[in-house]
Image (cartoon, rainbow, N blue to C red):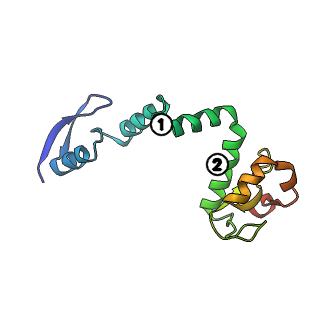
Amino acid sequence: MKNKKIKCFWCKKEFEKKISRIKQTEKLKQKHTCSPRCSSAIANAARESVPTTKNAEHTRRDKEKFPERDKARQIVRKAVKSGKLIPLKECEFCGSDNNIQAHHPDHFSPLLLVYLCKKCHAEADCSADKWIDLATDYSKCIN
């Protein structure tokens, strides 16, 4: 394959890249980078920029206002991804198996969870106290 000299978008260093890869990058409307480090720098800069959608703006504001929620969600995601926590497939309240979500009655105890369908989860968010008795502490299972 033929190579072509091109300039890195981030560090402005000139480097060689296969023409097929150049076309692929341009087709995907991405920036040309000389290394994964420069690619990460672009992604990080974009992440720190002003949110482009209402949903992204709301999410960022929520993460800043309630960091404990975000931390609790990260811990559960990591536990599920590593296979240490296997999420339930049905709602612990009504038994539905449609759109099951993990609910944190207390975000400061991230592995104290209740698995609920979307409808029951909306109800749980309105009155958190009554759901804490249903919660299971999964921290014993993970450690």
Residue at the image position 82 percent from the left and 49 percent from the top: 128
Labels 1 and 2 touching (C-beta < 8 A): no
Q: Is residue 143 visible?
A: no
Image quadrant occupied by the C terminus: bottom right
Mark-to-mark CA distance, 1 and 2: 22 Å
Residue 85 in percent (x, y) is at 69, 63
Under circle 1, the secondary element is loop
Residue at the image position 69 percent from the left and 37 percent from the top: 67
Q: Which mark is residue 74?
A: 2
64 or 21: nearer the eye?
64
Residue at the image position 72 percent from the left and 55 percent from the top: 121
Check disc 2 and give the amino acid type. Gln
80 or 35: nearer the eye?
80
N-terminal of the pair, mark 1 or mark 2, is 1
Residue matched to label 1: 53
Q: Which mark is residue 103?
A: none
Residue 119 in percent (x, y) is at 69, 58
Q: Is residue 109 visible?
A: yes
Left or right of residue 59: residue 103: right
> Which residue is situated farthest in the left direction here?
2
Check disc 1 and give the amino acid type. Thr
Residue 103 in percent (x, y) is at 73, 54
Residue at the image position 72 percent from the left and 67 percent from the top: 91
8 or 127: nearer the eye?
127
In the depicted structure, whether residue 15 falls above or below residue 89: above
Specify the quadrant of the image occupied by residue 4: top left
Specify the quadrant of the image occupied by residue 87: bottom right
Image quadrant occupied by the N terminus: bottom left
Under circle 2, the secondary element is helix
Left or right of residue 31: residue 102: right
Q: Nearer the viewer, mark 1 or mark 2?
A: 1
